[in-house]
Image (cartoon, grey):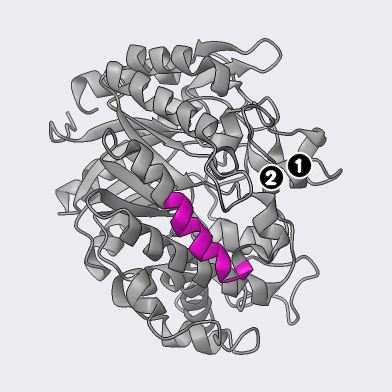
Amino acid sequence: MNTFDPGFLWGAATSSYQIEGASAEDGREPSIWDVFAAQPGNVRDGDTGDVACDHYHRYRDDVALMAELGLRAYRFSVAWPRVQPRGSGAVNQRGLDFYRRLVDELLSRRIEPWPTLYHWDLPQPLEDAGGWAARDTALRFADYAAAVHDALADRVTNWTTLNEPWCSAFLGYATGEHAPGRREPAAAIRAVHHLLLGHGMAASAMSGSRVGITLNPTQVSPATGSAEDLDAARRIDGVANRIFLDPLFRAAYPADVVEDLTEVTGFEHVRDGDLKVIAAPLDFLGVNYYTPAIVSGDGPAHPPAKPSPYVGAETVRFVDGGRPRTTMGWEVDESGLSDLLVRLARDYPVTALYVTENGAAYDDEAHDADRIAYLDGHLRACHDAVAKGVPLRGYFAWSLLDNFEWAYGYSQRFGLVHVDFATQRRTPKDSARWYAEVIRRGGL
C-alpha cells in the first residue's frame, strides 16, 4: 500500500469567480472576468460566472459536502472585487463578511482554510488604469492582501498570494484567451514582473503567517536529442518556468530568458530593489499540474498567425506524445508530475511543496472511472516523489465542484462533485467516494 505521512494534507480546491456567483450582490463590482465574459465570442456558448455554482448562497451545504468526503483542507480564493470593489480605497465589509462566515464554517467542521488572494479576478477599474502591465497594480494588491489578512489572520494560518501568474500574464495579456483579452507581448512581460512584485509586497504585509505562491510549472522535454529540440526545450522552460522560479528563489531573471526576450522588452520596468522584494523567503510553493510538454525546434519558419503564450518562443512546435487525452485535449502523463516535483526540489531551495491543483476534465455525471484512474496515477506519482526525498506536504484535487471553466464556460467538468447548473443540485461522483476512501486510509 502506498501510504503517506499521517501529517500529509488532503484537500480540494476551487476559485471565487468559478463557483461563487452573486456577481452584483453585497457591494461586489465587476472584475475583468465579468467584463470579458460579457463580450460575445470570448467564452464558449456565451457562458458567464454570474451564477456559476451559487456557492455564495450555498457555501454551508458545500462545506458539509467537504466534511462528508473527509477533506482536511479547502483551498479557495478571495474575490478582490468583492472585498475592495474599486481595487483600492475602502474595504467592503459585507464582502469580507462572506469570507469570515466561510472560514468559520470550515473551522467548525475541522477543515483547514487555505485562501488564495488572487485567482484572476482583477477589479475592472484597475485594468482600466493599466492592469498588471502597470506597476501601481502591484501596490494595490499589497494593500488588498493586508486588508484580507488583517480580517482573517486570527483564524487562517496558510496563505497563497497568487494562483498561476503565468496564466494571468500570458493568457491575459499576450494571447487574449483570458481576461482582460489583450494581445500585447510586451505588456505580458511587464505583467509577469508586476505580479511577482505584488506577491513579494503582499508577503511582506502578511508577516507572521505562512505565505506561499502557486505556480503552474510545466515539465518540458525535448522531442529528440537534437540541438534544435534541446534549445526549444530550454526556451519553453524559460518562459513557462524559470521566468517565475528564478526571481522567487534566486532574486534574478534568467540571463538566457532576458536575451530571448530582447526583441519584446528591455526589462526597463524592473527597478532597483524589486528582485529583493520578490525573493522574500517562501514558506511553501504550490504546484498546479495537469499535463507535460514535449517540444521540437523544427516549427514554422515564421511565427503562427495565432498569438502564442510562449512569448519569445513562438516557433517552437509542441509534439503529441501518443498518450490518452482528457476532454480539454491535455495528455495524461503522471510521470511528468513526479519528474517536475523532483526537479523543483533539486534546483530550488523549497522547504515545503504542495500539489495545489491536479485533476482532469471528462464527460461524466456520476460514474467517472477515467477521473479515478487519473487521480490514482498522479497520487502514485506524488508518493514516488516523496520516496525520492521531495518535501511534498499535501495534495489538493481540482476541483471540488464542476464549475465555470474560464473560456470553456460550463462545457468542461473537472469536479469530484457533479453540479446540475439548472437546479444547482450537487451529486458526488464515484471519484469523490474514491477520494474519500484514499483520505480515510491515508494512501492508495
Check disc 1 and give the amino acid type. Answer: Ala
Residue 383's label in the rendered image is: none
Helix, strand or loop at label 2? It is helix
Helix, strand or loop at label 1? It is helix
Residue 234's x, y, as percent?
A: 46, 77
Q: Which residue is mark 1?
A: 37
Residue 287 visible to the viewer? yes
Disc 2 to disc 1: CB gap under 8 Å = yes
Q: Which residue is mark 2?
A: 33
Residue 25 image-quadrant placement: top right
* Residue at position x 52%, y 11% in the image: 427
Residue 368 visible to the viewer? no
Give the total of numbered labels. Answer: 2
Left/right of residue 131 with respect to residue 271 in the rendered view: right
Left/right of residue 413 with respect to residue 372 in the rendered view: right
Q: Residues within 10 Å of mark 1 (few under 14, many from 20)?
A: many
Q: Which residues are magenta?
A: 133-145
* Residue at position x 30%, y 70% in the image: 249
Label 2 and label 1: CA atoms lie apart by: 6 Å
- For the C terminus, the image quarter is top left
**Foreground: 400 or 276?**
276
Check disc 2 and give the amino acid type. Answer: Trp
